[in-house]
């Protein structure tokens, strides 16, 4: 079974907006718990539970970012929002397929989350702080 590394928080992820960074750290922590369940061949119910937690937290987090974006003049938020929707869609599809879970599916969602996380924060969330430009 292929293992996956947990992600360490790196200052490069900082957007320098307190609530945004706090949420990102929390989300990273839940991601790492998912990786641990997978690496240790843990239970499918634990994995599902963590994934729901990640989804709920993400939905609130996206709402908060969408509110923040409204206050930034000249920000093109369209693609950022589409990328949030891509996350919501992918995780929903995964959840619906996971009823009879297997480790291959766990790996698939972990790899998706890794790819999404590492590009989204750097590409889009950084734009929420106009001082980061
Ligand atoms: Fe975002
Ligand atoms: Fe974010």
Image: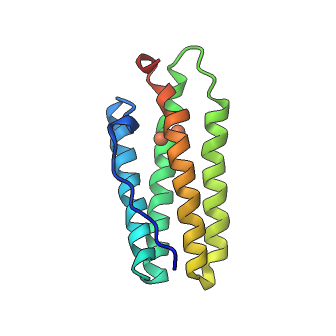
Q: In this orientation, which residue lies closer to the viewer: 12 or 67?
A: 12
Left or right of 89, for residue 102: left
Q: In this orientation, which residue lies closer to the viewer: 81 or 5?
A: 5
Q: In this orientation, which residue lies closer to the viewer: 95 or 133?
A: 133
Left or right of 121, for residue 25: left
Can you say whether 108 is above or below 24 in the image?
Answer: below
The x and y percentages for residue 56 are 48, 57
Left or right of 65, for residue 91: right
The x and y percentages for residue 6 are 39, 61
The residue under the point 46% across, 44% down is 61
The x and y percentages for residue 127 are 51, 26
Q: Residue furthest top?
A: 73
Q: Residue furthest front?
A: 2
Can you say whether 32 is above or below 16 in the image?
Answer: below
Can you say whether 101 is above or below 83 in the image?
Answer: below
The residue under the point 60% across, 77% down is 104
- Colour pattern of the rendering: rainbow
Query: Dividing the picture into quarters, in which one does residue 18 lie?
Result: top left
The residue under the point 38% across, 66% down is 33
Number of dots carrying numbers: 0
Q: In this orientation, which residue lies closer to the viewer: 68 or 76?
A: 76
The x and y percentages for residue 47 are 46, 74
Can you say whether 72 is above or below 13 in the image?
Answer: above
Query: Dividing the picture into quarters, in which one does residue 49 lie?
Result: bottom left
The residue under the point 46% across, 59% down is 54
């Amino acid at each position: 079974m292929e293992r996956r590394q947990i992600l360490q928080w790196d200052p490069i992820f900082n957007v320098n907006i307190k609530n945004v960074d706090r949420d990102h750290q929390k989300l990273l922590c839940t991601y790492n718990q998912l990786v641990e369940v997978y690496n240790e061949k843990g239970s499918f119910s634990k994995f599902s539970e963590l994934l729901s937690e990640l989804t709920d937290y993400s939905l609130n987090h996206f709402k908060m970012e969408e509110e923040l974006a409204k206050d930034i003049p000249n920000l093109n938020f369209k693609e950022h929002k589409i990328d949030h929707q891509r996350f919501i869609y992918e995780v929903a599809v995964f959840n619906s397929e996971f009823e009879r879970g297997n480790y291959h599916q766990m790996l698939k969602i972990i790899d998706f989350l890794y790819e999404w996380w590492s590009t989204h924060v750097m590409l889009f969330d950084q734009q929420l702080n106009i001082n980061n430009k």
